[in-house]
């Protein structure tokens, strides 16, 4: 059986720390890695829209000297003819050495992995998980803060449907002394199953609030998220909730001078563009980090040592 990354808990903390170390080494010495995946192929199967995740996977493989194939929408694959995801993945695993897959249905990459002869990476499944965004986030936190323990992180926005939040809460709950502040409207609270599995089972304290302003001065990291329009059942609810939080320079005035602001992107309007100039804004660095951590992950899953 190939090694798959479906959930962030498929990696131990030691392995995550090792991936971060490899990504740091790639950032420092890119030339060392430029032929590491020569003659290897990555397939990106995206049944849902994406900019950063798909292109950073492809850019990662190209920077390792490998090549890429795939599709960026279900309509251009045999899915449109009625083929099952299992058969599609089985087919692609005959052509590629590793597959990154995004799908609107929760659990689809897990199910598809049963039909694959090569490693499958979950590049986002519905409102469930997004483990490689979490690796990107962890690398960013490590580079910004110099550590992955002992801080207070606020998650703000759509904590219900935001799959990046679910995976990052799960990963961080395995590090020492992380304090979680969950900031969302009542309707978009972190799902009970994430709280149970990641926080309650491990006895980790957390607080829930609707008010970003009151908690701002205590945060070391602020993780902003987009309200996930595509997961709503009716437009009325989306319209009512979409502007719940809009981060502006004024709202950042009481924040710590060494706060780090993260966002998986894309942003809609939850962070004013004026915030980009604030030295505490780390989301564009986060975009760049996404490529290097995915390079490290591809090397690991293909068992290539440089
Ligand atoms: C996120 C996603 O797809 O879940 N984007 C990403 O991969 N960087 C966040 C989002 O779409 O809001």
Image (cartoon, helix red, strand yellow):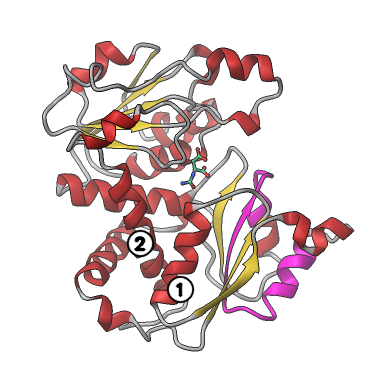
Of mark 1 and mark 2, the one earlier in the sequence is 1
Count residues near mark 1 (Cα–Cα under 10 Å), then give few for <14, some for 14-19, many for 20+.
Answer: many
Residue at disc 1, secondary structure:
helix
Quarter of the image that includes the C terminus? bottom left
Q: Which residue is mark 2?
A: 293
Left or right: 77 in relation to 223: right
Looking at the rendering, the stretch of residues picked out in magenta corresponds to 86-109
Q: CA distance from mark 1 to mark 2?
A: 11 Å
Residue at disc 2, secondary structure:
helix
Q: Mark 1 touching mark 2, by CB under 8 A? A: no
In this rendered view, identify the residue nearer to me: 137 or 271.
Answer: 271
Left or right: 164 in relation to 283: right
Residue drawn at x 69%, y 65% is 114
Kindly tell me whether residue 179 is visible in this rendering: no
Q: Which residue is mark 1?
A: 61
Residue 189: x percent and y percent?
A: 49, 21
In this rendered view, identify the residue nearer to me: 57 or 92.
Answer: 57
Q: Is residue 51 above or below residue 228?
A: below
């Amino acid at each position: 059986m190939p090694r798959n990354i479906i959930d962030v808990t498929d990696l131990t903390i030691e392995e995550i720390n090792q991936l971060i170390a490899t990504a740091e080494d790639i950032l420092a010495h890119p030339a060392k890695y430029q032929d590491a995946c020569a003659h290897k192929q990555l397939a990106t199967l995206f049944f849902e829209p994406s900019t950063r995740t798909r292109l950073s996977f492809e850019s990662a493989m190209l920077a390792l000297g490998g090549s890429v194939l795939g599709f960026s929408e279900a309509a251009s694959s045999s899915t449109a003819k009625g083929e099952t995801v299992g058969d599609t993945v089985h087919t692609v695993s005959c052509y590629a050495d590793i597959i990154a897959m995004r799908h609107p249905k929760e659990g689809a990459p897990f199910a598809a992995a049963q039909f694959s002869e090569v490693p499958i990476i979950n590049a986002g499944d519905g409102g469930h998980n997004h483990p490689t965004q979490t690796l990107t986030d962890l690398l960013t936190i490590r580079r910004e803060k110099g550590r992955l323990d002992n801080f207070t992180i606020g998650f703000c926005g759509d904590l219900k449907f935001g799959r990046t939040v679910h995976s990052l809460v799960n990963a961080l709950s395995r590090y020492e002394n992380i304090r979680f502040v969950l900031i969302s409207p009542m309707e978009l609270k972190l799902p009970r199953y994430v709280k149970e599995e990641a926080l309650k089972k491990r006895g980790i304290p957390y607080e829930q609030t609707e008010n970003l302003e009151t908690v701002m001065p205590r945060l070391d990291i602020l993780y902003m998220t987009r309200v996930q329009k595509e997961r709503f059942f009716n437009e009325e609810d989306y319209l009512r909730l979409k502007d719940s939080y809009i981060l502006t320079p004024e709202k950042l005035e009481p924040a710590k001078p060494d706060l780090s602001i993260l966002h998986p992107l894309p942003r809609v309007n939850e962070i004013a563009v004026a915030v980009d100039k604030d030295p505490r804004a780390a989301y564009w660095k986060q975009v760049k980090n996404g490529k290097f951590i995915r390079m490290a992950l591809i090397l690991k899953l293909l068992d290539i040592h440089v």
